[in-house]
Image (spheres, rainbow, N blue to C red):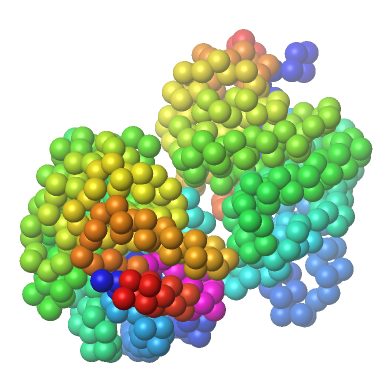
Amino acid sequence: MFQKTIVGNYPRPSWLRESLLKAEGKQKKAGLAGKEVESLYVRGIAEVIAEFESCNLDLITDGQLRLTDALASFCENLEGFKMTGLIRYYDNNFYYRQPETTGKISWKNPVFEADFKQAKKLAKKKIKCVLPGPYTLARLCKNTFYKDTSDLMWDLSSAIASEAKALENAGCKFIQFDEPSLVYDRKLECGLDKIMDALKKVESSVSAITCLQAYFGGFNGSLAGLLDLKFDVIGFDLVEGKENLNFMQEYTPKKDLSLGILDSRNIRLEKPSVVKARVMQAVKLTSPKNVYINPNWGLELIPREYAVKKLKLLSNIVDELKEDSA
Amino acid sequence: MSKKILQTTVVGSYPRLSYVVEAVAKYKKKLISKEELKKITDHATTEVVEEQIKAGIDIIADGEQYREDMEVYFAERISGFKEGDWIRIWGNNYYRKPIVHKKVGFIAPMTVEDYLLAEKVTAGRAQVKQMYTGPYTIADWAFNDAYDSKADLVLDLARILHKETKELEKKGCPYIQIDEPALSTHNSKDELEIARQAIEIVTKGVKAKTAIHICYGDFENIFPGLLDFKIDLIDLEFTNNQFKTLDIIKKYDFNKELGFGCVDVHTKRVESKEEVKENIKKALKILPPEKIYPKPDCGLKLLTREIAFKKLCVISEAVKELRAEL
């Protein structure tokens, strides 16, 4: 029942950080092509994938080492956007270039297909792909073209659906759609019916396992409608979404769960007994078939030595959970 | 000035002068000593103080030439912190996020010497304020590997910064600003309450004017709760968010003085005098002029020296005309 996974990003190895700095400097000076940079990324991704596998994770990513702008990187490759000034990514000391609409949004070519294929070649374990969800992406962008956020979200959902389809065609069997804004925003900027339409379009575009991943907050009753969507897995942040267990009690999701159980933004290691109790509470409340266990977000905002410690802790906790329920 | 109305001020940082940037690079390579670096930054402080006075600003600051950033600078001067590993901010830019590894404690004043230098250079031609990063933000931007709760860490830091505040007051500093940019990035009332308690500790028994500066984030998160803080002045950004901040504060009985961001620090374009006048008039619709302190949205660090100077000049020119008109 329990599977060990990660949400997405991971710290870049220190040698990669330094080599990229040097390579960028060289590129500026001599206009060198990206070949050298490309080989650096491949080496970095191989190293990170090996680290995931040595921590016995079941479902992994490529650590999203190539991304410069977290979820917003996707927009760079769509028609209808330009990238503008840096803006804070939620409550992190972490920034992204804000994409601004310049016209109607449309999907041109696969964005992450090559990355997926490469990761698949390097990995023994299953690779999942991570895409931004339509509501979150609409919220992260600056809209100067569409009538409102809902209209922007609708076109974004078509682009995300096309990308998901391309990833599935390339062989991806698990696609995660990240929707932190759904649980982070105090008040949604679009009606839930509109959000559900957009999510439905995204979800129904593929037959792969789909996961709606929400982090940096918890679900409240006003979001209960989302449980009617056909996502196979719903992600709950049990670190920063304290209300999630109450939500599960009240609305009993009939879904597989993805549970964020370790704090991805602090280095302190959690007590296994506390974490296990929380997981078992969620399991008892919802009786899921599969439970994916992960930190509550990617681990790139903690130093790598601690990221490994957290993954090992996660792996031990899941092993204990498996033993307890055997 | 017959009546103190629309006193102009700054938020704190001024672009680092080129020779400071060079000196810091040399210091990092161990080519110059700490004492040599200090001499150079002191000289730069003298220059930027003169420049602010020349621009006609009523309440100036030391310009933070000596501060590498607003987190590490303080973490290096408070006991209980250790240097952390590199954490990505954006693209290939990183910072060393400090780690709280034991109980934090006051070592020695952190900003007093620089206040005294700025005061000496100013020699009565303007008022000098001093600013430091607040307890909530210092805690929020560090890893906590020592305290069971964030609140305990924040309140201990508040006790340290209370000592700092008293030291500044003892030396005659009339205006002390606490920078809390992390506050508006969190949308939880519990977090705001931690900060409220912390500020109460920091400003307890302080007679000098105390201000809190907050930028970025969502100001809906901090109102109306911020009005209960024991502080004299609230300093916010307005221009960059197209005065959305005004719509928020208009809803409440604004019982403090207001630091009013009337030029945008995220654009290189220097606003016209007329624009700045119009901006300030927006604030005059809700508060009397003696309660409004026109200033840039935030620190000027990211602009060029020339543009920073021009932005300050246009504020003081606009205010000069407004004073005559009022």
Q: Quadrant of the C terminus of chain A?
A: bottom left
Residue A126 is situated, as x and y percent measured from the top left of the image, at 23, 80
Verify whether residue A304 appears in magenta: yes
Q: Give the side of residue B226 with respect to residue B122, left or right.
A: left
Q: Give the side of residue A172 with respect to residue A66, left or right.
A: left
Q: Is residue B10 visible?
A: no
Verify whether residue A17 appears in magenta: no
Q: Give the side of residue B289 with respect to residue B186, left or right.
A: right
Q: Residue at x 29, y 52 (%)?
A: A285
Residue A208 is situated, as x and y percent measured from the top left of the image, at 12, 69
Q: Residue at x 83, y 63 (%)?
A: B38
The segment highlighted magenta reads A294-311
Q: On screen, A48 above or below B244?
A: below
Q: On screen, B279 above or below A292?
A: above
Residue A263 is situated, as x and y percent measured from the top left of the image, at 48, 62
Q: Quick one: which residue is furthest to the right in this view?
A: B170
Question: How many numbered discs, if any?
Answer: 0
Q: On screen, A190 above or below A248?
A: above
- Which of the 4 image quarters holds residue A292? bottom left
Question: Between residues A228 and B221, which one lies in front from this camera angle?
Answer: A228
Q: Quadrant of the N terminus of chain A?
A: bottom left
Q: Is residue A9 visible?
A: yes
Q: Give the side of residue A129 with respect to residue B173, left or right.
A: left
Q: Residue at x 26, y 84 (%)?
A: A125
Q: On screen, A265 above or below A135?
A: below
Question: Between residues B132 and A190, which one lies in front from this camera angle?
Answer: A190
Question: Between residues B319 and B100, which one lies in front from this camera angle?
Answer: B100
Question: Between residues A58 and B12, which one lies in front from this camera angle?
Answer: A58
